[in-house]
Amino acid sequence: MTLEEAGLAAGRLHTLQRLYGAFEKRDGEAMQALYAPQATFDDPLFSLHGAAEIGAMWRMLCRSARKRSGDMWSLQAGDFHVEGLGGSAHWEVTYLYGTADRPVRNVVDSTFEFSPDGHILRHVDRFDFSAWAAQALGWPGRLFGALPPMRNYVRKQAAERLARFRATHL
C-alpha cells in the first residue's frame, strides 16, 4: 500500500468513526453529511436513494431515540475495516420501539462503498429481521416475523412513517 492509499484508507476509516460517533450522539444531520448526494441505503426496513432521503431516515430514528429511549439507548460500534473503496462495521444498538416502548437489541453488520472523495456511496445494513420483529412488534412479530408478508408490511409502514416525518419535520 502506498502512502497515498494509506491516507485514503485512513480518511474512509475516519468517515465510519464519525458516522457511528454521530449516531451515538443521535445526530442525524451530522450523519447525513457523510453521504454522497447520490448515495443509496438498504436494510430490511428501508431502501433509500440520495443523501437527503438517507439523512431524513437517520434524523427520524435519532429523534425517536432521543424522545423515547432516554437511558435505554446504547450503541456499541466497532470492528471497522476499510479496503480500497469498500468498508464494513459491526454494531449493536439497544432502544425502545413503538408506542408500546418495547425494548429492542439489534445486532447489525454493515458494508459500505465510498466515493473517491471519501463520502459514503452505498450503505447496506444486515440484521436478523425475525429477531428484530419478535422484539419490536411483540407477539405478531414472534409469530409472523419470518414470513415475507410481515416483512413487506413493516417495510411499507416504515416508508409511510418516513414520508410523514419528511413532510412535517424537513
Image: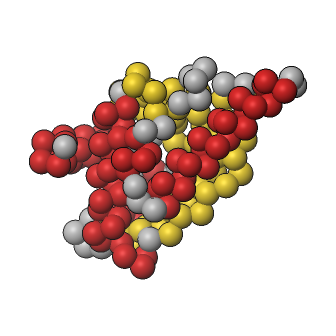
Q: Quadrant of the N terminus?
A: top right
Image quarter (top left, top right, bottom left or bottom right) of the C terminus: top left
Q: Which residue is located at x 65 percent, y 35 percent? A: 12
Residue 153 in view here: no
Q: Is residue 52 above or below residue 145?
A: above
- Residue found farthest to the left: 168
Residue 50: horizontal and vertical position, in percent? Answer: 36, 27
Q: How many numbered marks have been drawn onto this rendered protein structure?
A: 0
Would you say residue 3 is visible in this rendering?
yes
Viewer-nearest residue: 127 or 164: 164
- Determine the residue positioned at 61% across, 57% down: 77
Q: How is the image coloured?
A: secondary structure
Residue 142: name its quadrant: bottom left
Q: x, y percentage for residue 94? A: 48, 68
Q: Is residue 49 above or below residue 143?
A: above
Q: Is residue 21 left or right of residue 66?
A: right
Percent position of residue 73, x then y: 44, 71
Quick check: 36 left or right of 99? right
Q: Residue at x 60, y 44 (%)?
A: 16
Check the image and name the residue furthest to the bottom.
71
The quadrant in which residue 95 appears is bottom left
